[in-house]
Amino acid sequence: MDNSLNSKTLHFSICDVQSRMQIDRPNDLMLAYTRLMMGFLLFTPNPRHIAMVGLGGGSLAKFCYRYLPDTRTQVLEINPYVIALRNEFEVPRDDHRFNVRKEEAADYVRTAPYRFDAIIADGFDANGVPPSLCSQAFYDNCHDKLQPDGVLVANLHTGHEHFPIQLERMARSFAGQILAVDDFECNNVIVFAFKEAITSRRLLGNLKLCAMTLVPEAWHQLEPSFFRIGKSASGKKNHARDRPHEHRRDRSDGPG
């Protein structure tokens, strides 16, 4: 962790910024990729239950807790040292709609007794996305544990050698229904995966709903990213489009 006069930053290494908090505005989303990840609201604008993979500095967790008051958020974090920093980053205490749980997220998603409106996959370690959080089985389980109109949003790193494989696995689990958006700030790509096809009419309706229901403080932070996602969706071409997708359980995980 690194402190300055105005911010606190969580690093996995000297070069990799995992999370950043502005001290006088601790609930703001300072990193572009986090604002893009909140774009899941364009596809499920009234989530009742979110599973969040990875706590980090708590940027997404705090934002959801503050601005989605009717949503229950379950955070999964395997690293006890990260959890120990929750007070440093002003992560809310556990209550009836927010909980941080020390557990392997892949196991939790596989065995959860209910379905989620959104699964936010932002789990990293010093080597990138852990293998258990980018396997074919994990993406299959995410598909199974989403509501019919639910969405998986995953933060992937284009510099990782297995990035193309990770993207292909997501496409296979979700029958090609994915949308990838670059964050333009780092080497992150935010990938949205859907169980149902998203029409332009539905996307526009959800955009208007978000503009009406989010408080101005939240909307002003997210609006540019929402329009970027909408623009990407309007010209969307599925990744791995040069060949048909096989049944999502037909292949083993392989590397990554």
Image (cartoon, rainbow, N blue to C red):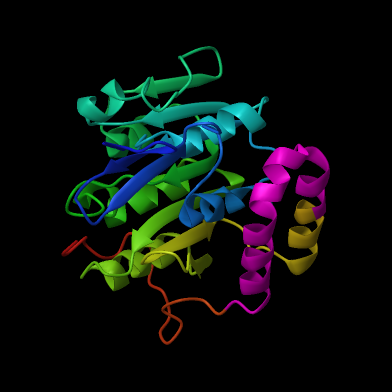
Residue for point 49% across, 69% down: 176
Q: Is residue 112 visible?
A: no
Image quadrant in which you'd find residue 15:
bottom left
Say if the magenta span includes residue 215: yes
Q: Is residue 122 visible?
A: yes
- From the viewer's perspective, tell me whether residue 116 is left or right of residue 66: left
Q: Is residue 126 left or right of residue 147?
A: left
Residue at horizontal 19%, vertical 61%? 256
User: Is residue 251 magenta-colored?
Assistant: no
In depth, the one of 99 and 141 nearer the eye is 99
4 over 225 or under it: above or below: above
Residues rendered magenta in the picture = 208-236
Is 100 or 82 nearer to us in this picture? 82
Task: Please state, as top left, top right, bottom left or bottom right, where the N terminus lies in the image.
Answer: top left
Q: Is residue 140 above or below residue 156?
A: above
Q: Position of residue 195 (x, y in %)?
A: 56, 55
Where residue 54 appears, as percent x and y from the top left, is: 35, 38
Q: Percent from the top left, x then y, of residue 65?
A: 57, 27
Q: Main secondary structure of the magenta part?
A: helix
Left or right: 175, with 212 as reference point: left
Horizontal and vertical percent position of residue 44: 66, 46
Q: Residue furthest front?
A: 5
